[in-house]
Image (cartoon, rainbow, N blue to C red):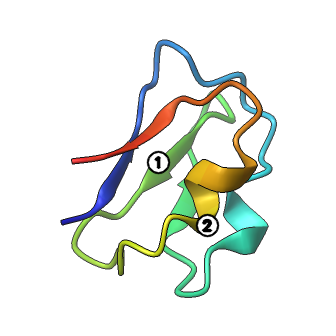
Amino acid sequence: MAHRINDDECIACGACEPVCPVECISAKDDDKRIIAEADCIDCGACAEVCPVDCIAQI
């Protein structure tokens, strides 16, 4: 399993990126974040800090 960011709800705050222990979250051209699902260890740290709850387990 992994986590995914809902692009429609992401506000590009960047809070999720620095808490990822495996650094699998990066910024896209529009500053919204994307998770490299193949690298995600499913720890949920990103979902815990998201202020708009746009990160969910897939």
Label 2 is placed on what type of residue?
Ala
For mark 2, give the secondary structure.
helix
Q: Mark 2 points at which residue?
A: 45
Residue 10, image x, y percentages: 60, 24
| Cα distance in 3D space between marks 1 and 2 | 14 Å
Q: Mark 1 points at which residue?
A: 34
Judged from the image, the secondary structure of the residue bearing numbered disc 1 is strand
Q: Do the residues labelled 1 and 2 touch (CB within 8 Å)?
A: no
At a point 62% along the width and 74% down the height, the residue shown is 20
Give the residue type that dot 1 points to.
Ile
- Number of residues whose C-alpha sits closer than 10 Å to that of mark 2, classed few (under 14), some (14–19) or many (20 or more): some
Q: Position of residue 48 (x, y in %)?
A: 66, 53
Left/right of residue 17 with respect to residue 39 in the rendered view: right
Q: Give the mark nearer the N terminus: 1 vs 2.
A: 1
User: Is 58 situated above or below 46?
Assistant: above
The part of the image, by quadrant, that contains residue 1 is: bottom left
Front disc: 1 or 2: 2
Q: Which residue is drawn at 22% across and 73% down?
A: 38
